[in-house]
Amino acid sequence: MNQLGFPILSLVLWLPALGALALIAIPRMGDATSRRVALACAMLTFLVSLVLPFNFESAPAQIMMVGAPPVMQFTESLPWLPTFGISYSLGLDGVSLWLVMLATFLGPIVVLSTWDSVHKQPRMFLALLLLLQTAMTGVFLAQDLLLFYIFWEFTLIPMTFLIGIWGGANRVYAARKFFLYTFAGSVLMLLAIIGMYVIHRGQIAQVDPSFRGTLDFGRIVSDLRQGNLQLSTTAERLLFGAFFLAFAVKVPLWPFHTWLPDAHVEAPTAGSVILAGVLLKLGSYGMIRFNLTLFPEASRWAAPAIGVLAVIGIIYGAAVAFAQTDMKKLVAYSSVSHMGFIVLGIFALNAEGVSGAILQSINHGLSTGALFLVVGVLYERRHTRELSAYGGIWKVMPVYAGLTLLIVLSSAGLPGLNGFIGEFTIMQGAFRSDYLGWIFVAFAVVGVVLAAAYLFKFYRAVFMGEVNEPANANLPDLSRRELATLVILAVPIVAIGLFPGILFGGMQHSVADVINGLTAVVAGR
Amino acid sequence: MELIIWLILLLPFIGFLLNVFFIRNERVAGILASAMVGASFVLTLVAVANLAGMPAESRRVQSVAWEWINTGGFRVPFGIMFDPLTAVMALLVTGVGALIHVYSIGYMHGDSRVVRYFAYLNLFITMMLFLVMANNLLLLFLGWEGVGLCSFLLIGFWFERKSASEAAVKAFVVNRIGDAAFILAMMAIYANFGTLNFYTVEYGGAVQEGFLNRMGEIIGLTFGPEWWQIGIATGISFMLLIGATGKSAQFPLFVWLPDAMAGPTPVSALIHAATMVTGGVYLMARTEPIFALSAATQTWVVWIGTLTAFIAATAALTQWDIKRVLAYSTVSQLGFMVAACGMGAYVAAIFHLLTHGIFKALLFLGSGSVIHGTHETQDMRKMGGLRKAMPTTFWTYMVGSFALAGIFPFAGFWSKDEIIGHAWFHNYLPAFFVLFATSLLTAFYMGRQVALVFYGDQRDRTYHAHESGQVMRLPLIALAVGAVLAGAINLPYLHWLTDWLQPVLNEEAVTWGVGNYVLAIIATLAAAAMMYTGWWVYTRNTNRVKVGGKDPAYRYSGDIWDGMSEAWYLDAFYNRVVVGGFKRTADFAARVLDPRGVDGVVTGIGRVFGALGVGVGRTQSGYVRTYALVFTVGVVIVLGFLAFAR
């Protein structure tokens, strides 16, 4: 069935769900036990997922043929609704490899972060977290459009509850907004999936009357690339638009971003980390996997316009972040800015841009996830996130201040740390892109300046100056658990900054496939 | 050799790691940090000796540790190099750096965070060495931003002070503006040459080309709209120039440097005088072939440098803070170097960079000694007559002042004379006159400073002035010797430095004629006269200098004096217009535009669609399940339509 002869992807996918099941099903489990169970389950998942990069073939043996679909590894497939050509099929390639790893890596960290912060029904909370992890991993792994859609929608439910039940004062509003925005986007995507299915079945059935239709991603792509499936320009652009809207809301791309600050501010720390760390990446992943691969012509057509939105998002997000006085809102808007970079890279439509975007998705997950943890550390001690409530924390909590500085620098794109490599590669891609160009970068680079402005505004307000409030004078420095979570995040932040080749190497082949797909179709027409 | 040059970099870095993670003892930290940089200096000497043993045209060692970035197309090695230009920079960084480390042991004694201080200093040296040793622009940029980070950490070292934390953030953010331009320049270089390596390098069994010797490929290429075509070379070099104006504190981005004096004084000496701020000059010298292609940029370079030199000198003239005089003086001298680059006199720029690095470090350390000996006094109005209490500081300070003023035979005379001479003999006459006037101002404000600090009587008697200890005096003496002798490295007729840099910068030594002698004599006599005048005016009027009072010259110049002391209100302009404007815009976006405008429109569109489907009343119910139901029903309808329409 695959190179390991073992359904490794299913294991990685369903282990967290099993953990969740155990948490729900076993009666009268104490809070402490349930925490340990959840942590063990998340760590086990991560350990199992380590098999993936070590066995991943960065240059798979199958020779890339014109018209072949992307090469998936560790594949497994079971028929599910054979009459509609729907199957349970999973696969992994260079685009999704590191995103899956990001999800499994953040899993235990997020579970750890709930230790002291979640007191209301921690068992339910953890169960939802684990379910969410399964759903997100499923999005990255699914190779069937319906399966993908189911996982995609399923991420909504646990997240909505996490915000709606364990959130702050305005949690119901935020949860509803989160749900509506993303759901509105995904409904369009469902329409597009159905449309794709109908068109595909119609066209293939003309040649092969016995064909009953399929939602298998690889099959559709190969039919597209071989010219068996041809979309009219209008149809392609409409389908592209429907997929794109769903992903743009998720990313979120300006102007669809307004759900994000509300969701972040109300969400508990763990929810924010997962939201910024992995959930947003579902959007950027979707753009690469579906928009670029399925609709090459429309991608090229829309690239400049999307580039403009991305650049607006970069500058706008940064400016609004600068004006915030609530730390979480500041970080949330910084996400809007950073995710703008990722979209810019994707729609540069070249290898640099797309590789940079994938790398930056990982980087953003690490750095912004860490930033939310950093905010959480203070929030748990003082129960406020107002910048003006703090000052001089460097003196009171030196270890915490040092680690925070590293994370801030990573987010600000300091060379030697991960964020810089991603941003630079993206901008390099956009600069050389046939569809964007230097003018886009000239504006995007403003975001780099502003990132320093808002991040250091935050750092100065909280950590520098005199200790201005007596309540801050005796704050304890990081507990061992907090220290562990931040240090674990700091390791890849430094490692990727110095050795990004580890990540780039794995994704190269798949990125080349996406880019070739974009141009091969041009040649075919 | 490859091992040696890596060790030069790694030793301070090891010092940094040890100081961060293991050492908790002040004394050990200082000694370890100094020893690491000292060892690195010795290794640099060894490497230079090795380099000198090679034939002139092959004096370049490159070493690639690993492939840093490889995305298929875009490839950058993590590699360093050692060539004549790098060598002189590395000597300056490690040599002056080691002395300042030793001095810091005395200066920082008793501070509560000394270990951290030495860790930062070691990290700074590492990053500065990356800057000058990188074999490609991207790694240079790592050092470039790294020194910026250390500058932030060290300016903000006493982060409890408001002025320090503000200055630290300001330095970082202002530098970022230059960095953004630097990033654009790198991208343009990569887009046109397909590499960021300076020179051709071989690693991993393959040869990667460099861009510096392939300038022919971009001659005549342009970009931009049809009605405004810009040469690629002009675009790239102009972006590099903006990058340099940030780091090297040039107009219009010099505003961060005077504020940066909030850091400990040895930091000002090391980072904000001798090494980091010269990064921009080094960058321009290294990428000189690009600048050579663009006459337009070169003119900009000359005038930015010249203007900066003049503005900063007028500002230095009017300061009361002993360190701010030196800070503006540094900006002014960097202007000389930049102007020299613009005139194509790169060797003169590097020469001045080296001598300035020595004598300005001396002056800063001297001012540190004064501050230390007067119990944290920085206001020169409170000083006076200190030559009796601190003889070593006084004499070494005098040496530094002569060197800065450009008086024969001190180091500054030789290097400044080369720049001014080049301006005169290569027909940059307007720039020449401004620079010459600036050098007279320089002599004058040094005379003023020396008079205010060391002559007359102590005006504020609330403290007891004392000389600094041995560990601080020795570096002063060592640097004073350097400030006397450093001119020897590029004397007329001998021109060692020109010959040494010839393989990199391709400049021929100037043959001295009568004109050079006349100019040199006029320059040194004028400088001596102006310095004497400055000294004379302020010793004569010493009784009119009052604590908190106005300068004696204020009566004659009035508001002009105020304008000069605020560096022509550039900072105020930025605060009001740029920063203020940005803050208002950002506030508007955050409080009004985003919650009402963008959110409102997007939500509104959503509502309209909802209303079309089932009517306004039902959608306003607020129940998620209602919304979900509406959507699902809609989906089913469309689905059915698609399925049965065929």
Image: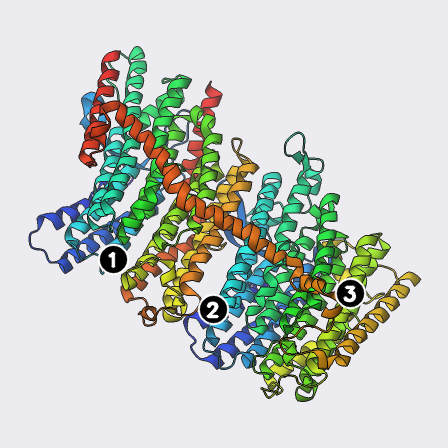
Protein chain holding label 1:
A
Q: Residues within 10 Å of mark 1 (few under 14, many from 20)?
A: many
For disc 2, the marked residue is B159
- Which dot, 2 or 1, sits closer to the camera? 2
Q: Which residue is identified by label 1? A: A112
For the N terminus of chain B, the image quarter is bottom right
Same chain for labels 2 and 3? Say yes or no.
yes
- Gap in Å between the C-alphas at discs 2 and 3? 36 Å
Q: Quadrant of residue A138?
A: top left
* Res A95 visible: no
Quarter-wise, where is residue A93 in the image?
Answer: top left
Q: Position of residue A133 (x, y in %)?
A: 24, 45
**As drawn, is B281 to the left or to the right of B22?**
right
Residue at disc 2, secondary structure? loop
- What residue is drawn where x is 69% and y is 67%? B316
Crowding at mark 3 (Cα within 10 Å: few <14, some 14-19, many 20+)? many
Report, in whole angstroms, how far the alpha carbon at label 2 lies from the one at label 1: 32 Å
Q: Mark 2: few, some, or many residues within 10 Å (few <14, many ≥20)?
A: many
Q: Position of residue B260 (x, y in %)?
A: 57, 65
Give me the C-alpha separation between circle 3 and circle 1: 64 Å
- Identify the secondary structure beneath mark 1: helix
Residue that numbered label 3 is attached to: B439
Question: Tag 1: residue type?
Answer: Leu
